[in-house]
Image (cartoon, coloured by chain):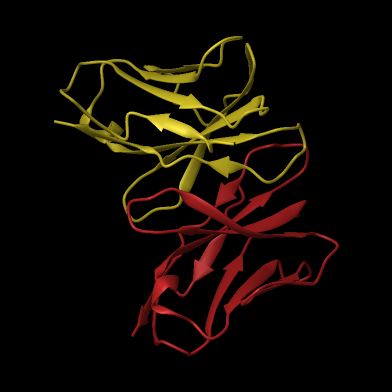
Amino acid sequence: NAGVMQNPRHLVRRRGQEARLRCSPMKGHSHVYWYRQLPEEGLKFMVYLQKENIIDESGMPKERFSAEFPKEGPSILRIQQVVRGDSAAYFCASSPLQGSTEAFFGQGTRLTVV
Amino acid sequence: SQQGEEDPQALSIQEGENATMNCSYKTSINNLQWYRQNSGRGLVHLILIRSNEREKHSGRLRVTLDTSKKSSSLLITASRAADTASYFCATSQGGSEKLVFGKGTKLTVNP
């Protein structure tokens, strides 16, 4: 059973471009969480999704950021018109059940905006 | 919003010694979890302790939880160089599914 898969592992974008980060949850998991980690910081919650639904997006910046988890395919975190401050590691986690508190994390995507 | 805070921020010990890291939080929680992160890598789940538990063991790890003081500690016994990593506590509260992380303790175990 493969773990949570994120790709790409590293992504370089110029200011103003779009970044698309993908997350395939563990097999059988229908709950996906996105977190952002700035250097030397802990992880900050961004958004919680179930298939085709956004459950909690209280940590998402109001502009330029969006997330989806379609019926088929991976969850996507999209950042439009990236700025240098978006440079960070973005982690996806998945869990099998609502209320299941152990989340399994992917290796992360390290976004660098130049 | 509530946030876990670990201390110390950095800890350097010799192989074979014990390492103790602490975490404090501000509001009532459902449970508290500890994660390890090797440099540039993802998070590995270590142990979960529920709000009605006081102590839990897993191999060389011992976690305590004191809800009256809103604090937890992670003890790694007989440390190894491979334990070198950052350690984070994370809490979940109420009906929320999200985890709230502290800034972490950077542990260095010198061979």
Asked where in the image residue A86 lies, by quadrant, the reply is: top left
Foreground: B35 or A5? A5
User: Compared with residue A20, is residue A12 higher up or lower down, i.e. above or below?
Assistant: below
Residue B14 percent coordinates (x, y): 39, 89
Indicate the chain coloured yellow by its letter: A
Indicate the chain coloured red by its letter: B
Q: Residue furthest right?
A: B52
- Left/right of residue A87 with respect to residue A92 in the rendered view: left
Foreground: B2 or B92? B92
Q: Residue at x 58, y 42 (%)?
A: A104
Asked where in the image residue B63 lies, by quadrant, the reply is: bottom right
- Count of marks overlaid on the render: 0
Work out whether residue B9 can be spotted: no
Q: Locate the C terminus of chain B by quadrant.
A: bottom left
Asked where in the image residue A22 lies, by quadrant, the reply is: top left
Work out whether residue A73 can be spotted: yes
Residue B67 percent coordinates (x, y): 77, 67
Q: Residue at x 59, y 32 (%)?
A: A26
- Left/right of residue B42 with respect to residue A85 in the rendered view: right
Residue A28 percent coordinates (x, y): 68, 27
Q: Residue at x 41, y 87 (%)?
A: B15
Foreground: A78 or B37? B37
User: Compared with residue B43, is residue B64 higher up or lower down, i.e. above or below?
Assistant: below
- Left/right of residue A35 with respect to residue B41 in the rendered view: right
Q: Residue at x 20, y 16 (%)?
A: A16
